Image (spheres, rainbow, N blue to C red):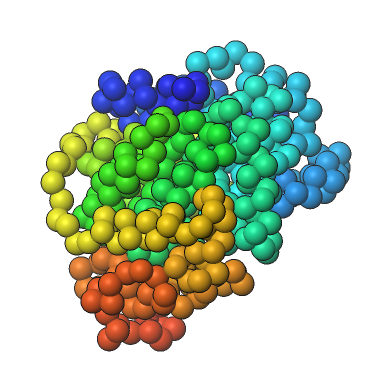
Amino acid sequence: MTGFAAFVGRAAAEGRLVVQPRMGMASPREMRAGLLAVLAARATTVGTLTVDSYTRVGDHRAALTALRDGALLNGYPIVSHHPDTTRAVLDGLAGFPVQVRHGSADPRAIFGALAAAGLDATEGGPVSYCLPYSRKPLRDSVEHWTEACEGFSGHLETFGGCMMGQLCPPSLLVALSVLEAVFFRHHGVRSVSLSYAQQTNSDQDAEAIRALRVLAGRFLSDVDWHVVVYAYMGVYPRTPSGARLLNDNAARLAVRAGAERLIVKTVAEAHRIPTVAENVDALESAAAAAEAAGFGESTEDTGVLAEATALVEAVLDLPGEPGAALLAAFRRGLLDVPYCLHPDNAGHARCHIDDAGRLRWSSVGAMPIPRSVVDRDSPSDSASLLAALHRVAHLHDA
């Protein structure tokens, strides 16, 4: 078990939710100060080193130029900084795990840089860091992630449970998270976490996280794993009170459904990049909400597990190893992400939010999901889509 996973496991055994920011600064001095502030927060925390956009797309020359010229970067250019520089950022932080977050469909250089600096945790996936974020063909992303995973001995978190940030029914998020974790394991990774992003209805989310745990127990029984919940990734509330409420609700959801870790959001999410102080405030607020929350054993079965199981089984029944199966699944439309415009996505799936705030299918395309769950009478005009995108923000601001 890696240092990152072991830390999360000990906290879970003691009944503490691990909370984590998404924070990255170009300056090594500022990055170190941010990590120290997260470590000192009144919460059980792990640190984050989020890379910049140039590094994310592999434009390391532009990142180096920005560092040389003193230009602003929106993250830490780990490939451009010498490993000794990054080790100095981490000096004296033994026992405080730090994860590298990046968003790259070609993470090979990032994996090499983090390993050279002595880090053992990162995240992403061949689907989840390609379809929403990249123009690369999915086949190229699978090849790049295959190479990166086969040389990686640390902890790897799938981003598959966060596709498109919002308006993706939970069963598909669960299935993609499991399938990316199976891909990681096939290529030698022995410590994984499975992600799920808070959506539009807490009961449906709790059902989805429990389904994720069931499938992880079935398909990943021979590796170390835990579940990480992301605070809502769609249009965020504009008021501080609404933003804090949504973040705290994510913490309550994580505890209720038995997740071990939470990625937080701040009161500044709707406006700008948050400060270190705002990140610390979000961590402490979420930790307090989690401490006051309780685990909930039962939840209504609305079919999330059955749908997710059908999706996972349909993909893994395809010929070849998991990467080849993922490519074939998207080519045939067995996996189809709503509103995703990447050319390797079929684009036939659609969903909507019903009157109870649950995400429901409007169209499932060729996916192996029963047509009986499809609500074909749901509104499909642009006004309805915009209302759905802003629904969570408006409710929490109100």
**Which residue is nearer to you in this view: 331 or 232?**
331
**Which residue is nearer to you in this view: 267 or 119?**
119
Q: Position of residue 95 (x, y in %)?
A: 50, 16
Residue 24 visible: no
Name the residue rendered at 39%, 38% in the picture: 220
Above or below: residue 375 compared with residue 195: below
Q: How many callouts does the rendering have?
A: 0
Q: Quadrant of the C terminus?
A: bottom left
Q: Position of residue 369 (x, y in %)?
A: 32, 69
**Which residue is nearer to you in this view: 126 or 321?**
321
Q: Position of residue 149 (x, y in %)?
A: 61, 38
Residue 166 visible: yes
Q: In which image quadrant can residue 300 be found? A: bottom left
Q: In which image quadrant can residue 248 be found? A: top left
Q: Position of residue 245 (x, y in %)?
A: 31, 49
**Which residue is nearer to you in this view: 244 or 206?**
206
Above or below: residue 366 compared with residue 129: below
Name the residue rendered at 46%, 44% in the picture: 182
Name the residue rendered at 46%, 22% in the picture: 1
Farthest front residue in view: 319
Q: Is 27 on the left-hand or right-hand side of 23? A: right
Name the residue rendered at 43%, 22% in the picture: 6
